[in-house]
């Protein structure tokens, strides 16, 4: 079924993204996977091509286009090229971190941070998860004690995407440890602040080019002017922006599933067994038919969610539905496509093998499938 989501400007942007990815990411992707991190120069190069900060007002050096369709194009082209780990830092900056600054920052903070975010000179991360706290954000233990015109921050975070490269870390902290959700605030902790240390770059199952780090804070003095939003309102700030984050994950998951389908169609047409292409076997046709149908259905739901987000109407429940369904779909599709590749599908030289490893975490980050189902179930009055 033909998609009707994008307009001429989005398709022109797609060509820019596709050219950039082919030239600046694909040739280096395997090396970055081996290194476990992309160079900071990649962010600056992306910023120079207008691939960062599309929603940032022009007065701060951005694209002046608060239209999530541009974000979707970027995610789709990264998945199409099979460079999940190398590109995740860009989508994290645009889809997840930027809205906090756009929506919550003061004019002074915007002037200080937005130009660098849009240019790629400032890399961003968001730090919520802690060694003993995942989905239960109310139990975070990182504290921020007020001391005059500073907060004194102590604690640790883990599984932080962009953790090695980040210049600005939006950290969820407890400004009132006696409270759960009502005691949480957001502080922007900056590279170079004394007591802010980065631990190891974590060794993951997949998405190897994406730096994922442990962070620690020991008596870090963070100026009060780095408070993002309202003190004690962090949980509400996070909840308000989770729908876009979860939709972004659904967009990428659907695009990854569609890409796996394309790779596998090409493989089963070319690979022969028993004197004929394996795609001509009924089982192969049925599997491909099922995948193509499910991907098409998911794509149109996701496209409607993008329209709703742009209109300011995307609910947390609809975003949760998109997130859990599309990431579970991604896992099923990549697994079935790998099976049709046979033994070659288990070899890392084939992109389907890398996609299999890269896909597993999408059912975890941004809210696990189980948490997403809880969101939907509660909305049903259960």
Image: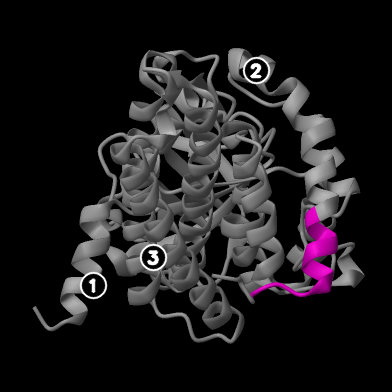
N-terminal label among 3 and 1: 3
Q: Is residue 109 left or right of residue 360?
A: right
Front position in the image: 61 or 269: 269
Instruction: Identify residue for label 1.
Output: 376
Q: Pointers 2 and 3 in contact (CB under 8 A)? A: no
CA gap between label 2 and label 3 equals: 30 Å
Q: Is residue 6 magenta?
A: yes
CA gap between label 3 and label 1 equals: 11 Å
N-terminal label among 1 and 2: 2
Q: Is residue 43 left or right of residue 175?
A: right
Residue at image x 43%, y 39%?
A: 154
Residue at image x 70%, y 72%?
A: 6
Instruction: Identify residue for label 2.
Output: 30
Residue lying farthest to the left in this orientation: 382
Element on which disc 3 rests: helix
Q: Is residue 103 left or right of residue 180?
A: right
């Amino acid at each position: 079924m033909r998609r009707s989501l994008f307009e001429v400007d989005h398709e022109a942007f797609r060509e820019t993204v596709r050219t950039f990815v082919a030239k600046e990411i694909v040739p280096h992707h395997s090396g970055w996977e081996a290194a476990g991190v992309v160079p900071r120069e990649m962010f600056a190069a992306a910023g120079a091509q207008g691939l960062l900060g599309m929603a940032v007002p022009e007065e701060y050096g951005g694209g002046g286009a608060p239209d999530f369709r541009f974000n979707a194009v970027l995610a789709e082209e990264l998945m199409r090229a099979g460079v999940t780990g190398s590109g995740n830092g860009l989508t994290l900056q645009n889809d997840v971190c930027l809205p906090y600054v756009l929506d919550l920052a003061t004019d002074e903070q915007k002037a200080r941070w937005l130009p660098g975010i849009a240019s790629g000179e400032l890399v961003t991360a968001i730090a919520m998860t802690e060694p003993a706290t995942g989905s239960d954000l109310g139990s975070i233990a990182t504290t921020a004690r007020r001391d005059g015109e500073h907060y004194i921050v102590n604690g640790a975070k883990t599984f932080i995407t962009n953790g090695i490269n980040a210049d600005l870390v939006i950290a969820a902290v407890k400004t009132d440890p006696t409270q759960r959700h009502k005691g949480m605030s957001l502080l922007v902790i900056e590279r170079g602040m004394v007591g802010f240390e980065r631990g190891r770059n974590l060794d993951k199952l997949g998405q190897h080019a994406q730096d994922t780090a442990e962070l620690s804070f020991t008596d870090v003095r963070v100026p009060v002017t780095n408070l993002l939003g309202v003190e004690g309102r962090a949980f509400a700030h996070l909840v308000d922006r989770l729908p876009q984050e979860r939709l972004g994950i659904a967009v990428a998951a659907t695009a990854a599933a569609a890409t796996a389908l394309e790779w596998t169609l090409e493989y089963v047409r070319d690979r022969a067994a028993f004197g004929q292409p394996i795609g001509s076997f009924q089982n192969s046709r049925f599997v491909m038919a099922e995948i193509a149908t499910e991907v098409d259905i998911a794509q149109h739901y996701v496209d409607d969610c993008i329209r709703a987000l742009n209109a300011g109407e995307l609910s947390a429940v609809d975003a949760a539905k998109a997130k859990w369904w599309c990431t579970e779909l991604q896992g099923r599709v990549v697994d079935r496509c790998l099976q049709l590749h046979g033994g070659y599908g288990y070899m890392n030289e084939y992109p389907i093998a890398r996609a299999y490893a890269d896909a597993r975490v999408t059912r975890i980050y941004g809210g696990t499938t189980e948490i997403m189902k809880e969101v939907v179930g509660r909305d049903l009055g259960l």
